[in-house]
Each structure stands twice: as structure tokens, then as C-alpha cells.
Image (tube, rainbow, N blue to C red):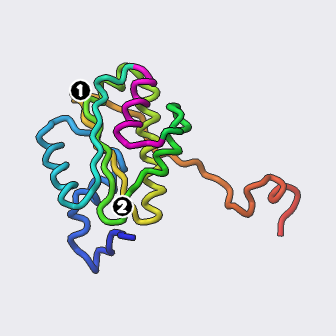
Amino acid sequence: MVFFKRKEKAPTEPQRLDWRLLERGAIALYFKSSILSADLGWFRQAKYVVHEMNGAGWETPASFHADVQRALSFPDYYAKNLASWIDCLAELPVPDDGGTALVFRRYDVFAKAQPQLAQTVLDSIESASRRFLLTGRRLLALVQSDDPRIRFERVGAMPVTWNPREWLDSERIGGRD
């Protein structure tokens, strides 16, 4: 597993592009193609696997699912729905060395045609990225938009939950230690 090193041992780690992006979240918006191209060069040099997709044709959920299945080499059992998207995203090959970058061009077209799905896709990537980070693997999404004012709701919100040993109500209600 390749983790970021502690600051005192590797003072250059916080200067890395992936570090700078991930400390703000796994989703980074891009407007200028020149900046996205430069950053993609960095990711490729850093041994990231890069998957590029174009959201301009994603006017329906079916068109989104068909394209991502092809681009991400999802298995034949991919059911082309959100549950299957989340499951297959969690199984995406993310190498220990470098990571994986999902590049979505023209996401503004998709977000305009399918706003709820576009938001949910970003939310699921943020959540999957957090899980991958637990094992030292890095997953990021670079999201290009031709709309410089595009906005999305927060992504990756996690609920506050009970610890595993007190998950069931019966373990908590009716008594204290």
C-alpha cells in the first residue's frame, strides 16, 4: 500500500497534485481545458490509471450507464442502475502505485440533462474514494465543465452512526453498564 508519508518524513508530499486535490475532496472541477490537460499529464507521470469519458451524450440514465460500463470495463453483470454503479465503482481496479483518475468532460451537459443522477454519481465517487483511501489507494474524479458557474451540492456526507457493537437498538435500549 502506498500511503502519503508524514510531513516530517517527506516534506514534498503536500506539494503533490493528488494531495492538494484530495485534501479538499475526491472531486475536482475544471473549466479550462489547458489546466485539465496539464493536470492529466501530472497524473499519468505519477502512474495513475486515467479513464476519460465525455458526458455530452449522457441525456438519459441509460446513455450514462452504457458509456461508463464501456469506459470503465465494468463486467457484463453490470445492471445499468445506481446500485450496480456503486457496487462496480467499489470494485474498480485502483492500483497501489499511483491511483485511478476518472475524467469526465462536458459534465455540465450531463448535469443539465440529469441533475439528480449527476449529483449522485459525484457523491458515490467521493464515498468510494474515502473507502479506497482506507487501504492506501487513491481514486479521484476530474470533472470538466464548459459552464464556469456550475455548482453541486456537498458530496460524501457520512451519517453519524452507532459503533458496530451497539448498532442494534436492543444493545443500547434498556440498560447501562
Q: Main secondary structure of the magenta part?
A: helix
Mark 2 or 1 closer to N-term? 2
Residue 92, above or below 113: below
In percent of width and height, residue 136 lies at 41, 65
Pointer 2 with pointer 1, Cβ within 8 A: no
Distance of mark 2 from mark 1, alpha carbons?
Answer: 32 Å
* Residue at the extreme front of the image, as rendered: 76
Q: For the point 37% across and 31% down, which residue is it? A: 67
Residue 147 is labelled as 1
Circle 2 residue:
95
Within the image, what quadrant is residue 12 found in? bottom left
Q: Quadrant of the N terminus?
A: bottom left
Find numbered disc 2 in the image and state the secondary structure of the residue it sits on: loop
Q: What residue type is labelled 2?
A: Pro
Left or right position of 174 against 165? right
Alpha-carbon neighbours of circle 2 within 10 Å: few (<14), some, or many (≥20)?
Answer: some
Q: Where is residue 126 in the image (x, y as percent from the top left)?
A: 43, 47
Magenta span of residues: 60-75
Q: Is residue 62 magenta?
A: yes
